[in-house]
Amino acid sequence: MADPTLLILPGDGIGPEVMEQVVRIIDWFGEKRDLKFDVKIDLVGGAAYDAHGTPLTDETMDRAMKADAVLLGAVGGPAYDDLDFSVKPERGLLRLRKEMDLFSNLRPAQCFDALADFSSLKKDIVAGLDIMIVRELTSGVYFGEPRGIQDDNEGGRIGVNTQRYTTNEIRRVARSAFELARRRNNKVCSMEKANVMESGILWREEVTWVHENEYPDVELSHMYADNGAMQLVRAPKQFDVIVTDNLFGDILSDCAAMLTGSLGMLPSASLGAPGENGRPNAMYEPVHGSAPDITGQGKANPIACVLSFAMALRYSFDQGDEATRLEKAVEKVLENGARTPDLMGLDGGTPITTVQMGDAILGALNASL
């Protein structure tokens, strides 16, 4: 049987640096756990624009569609700020999400015990936090038409974006959230703005329909998204799985991310519908951006990218035990006090480099055998 295929797109900024550590871990699983992958490496974002004049070539898009999973680093940077909107690095990422139909974005927010003091919130508020935000990723205001900027014929301009959702788009991401909840604590909170937006009314009605007709065993609650943001910083452990639309999911997941203390710690998965082989189209990426201010300095935290690969092991390759092995290795490294600069706020001491963090995780993996 052929090895599963993994397309790696390191991207821009710190993307290549953190991805280098992930590749070392992928190699470790091949050597020590007989879990081998057919790995291909390609370009996306600014790196692709520099080489080809486009943030994503048709050839790379085709490779992504054929791969069992895509692992992406980060895109963007100030060098590309003046490019036309159509060729900005982020357009490559959006094209991948859209054409792969990655409608369900999974953003876990987990606070490791070793980092509970690092959160900006009190320790008792975040200690033991483990929530999952499911964000609809391929529709809503980021993709709706009409959109654009036009003259208003009175000397000014009008910016237009359209919030649009269909029954199918809402129901399929709701199913994704309910399925996840069944494997966790069996609770879903759906967030929207049904009090002021027709799309929010439809969202609430369709999520309720899926619950009543397909997942009555899962506890469902509804919350306005602005209240949800407040509750995330007031009492985040009340939540298990949160499902919400593209715009609110973008905002709420970043809010939840900072509960854990650092964006450098958090992975994500973007999943589509299962294909003929049973695997969904899937792309895994760290939540953090390209961090151009620390690029090339060995300061980047690779943990979010490493944990993104752990999510790939779990959701694309049915290797839950090996995903847990990797997650526990990361937890052990943090318990032992290893800290990249982004995690130095309260601990003092000397930070380690990106490569040294990779070394530490590999050491913990070896110790797990």
Image: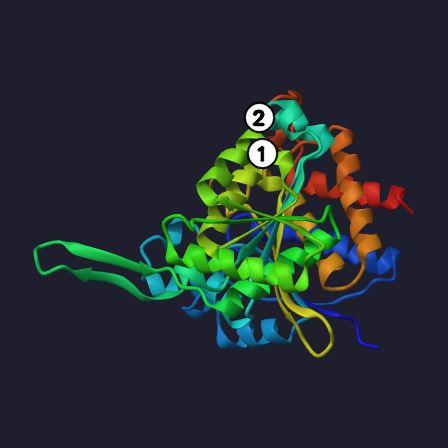
Q: Residue furthest right?
A: 369
Q: Crowding at label 1, few (<14), some or many (≥20) Cα neighbours within 10 Å?
A: many
Q: Nearer the viewer, residue 168 or 130?
A: 168
Residue indicated by mark 2: 121
Instruction: Kindly check if marks 2 and 1 are in contact, taking CB atoms under 8 A apart as contact.
Output: yes
Amino acid residing under circle 1: Leu
Q: Nearer the viewer, residue 242 or 21?
A: 242
How many discs mark residues in the rendered view? 2
Instruction: Indicate the position of residue 300 as horizontal and vertical percent values.
Output: 59, 41
Q: Determine whether, in the image, residue 142 is placed left or right of residue 279.
A: left
Instruction: Indicate the position of residue 248 as horizontal and vertical percent values.
Output: 46, 49
Q: Residue at x 64, y 53 (%)?
A: 19
Could you say which quadrant of the image residue 342 lies in?
top right
Query: Is residue 144 in view?
Result: yes
Instruction: Indicate the position of residue 181 as horizontal and vertical percent values.
Output: 69, 52
Instruction: Indicate the position of residue 294 as horizontal and vertical percent values.
Output: 51, 39
Q: Nearer the viewer, residue 243 or 339?
A: 243
Amino acid residing under circle 2: Leu
Q: How is the image coloured?
A: rainbow
Query: Is residue 283 in view?
Result: no
| Earlier residue among tags 2 and 1 | 2
Q: Residue at x 56, y 77 (%)?
A: 62
Q: Nearer the viewer, residue 146 or 261?
A: 146
- Of helix, strand and loop, which one carries label 1? helix
Quarter of the N terminus within the rendering: bottom right
Q: Residue furthest bottom?
A: 276
Residue indicated by mark 1: 259
Label 2 to label 1: alpha-carbon separation: 7 Å
Q: Residue at x 46, y 64 (%)?
A: 139
Residue 278 versus residue 190 in the image, above or below? below
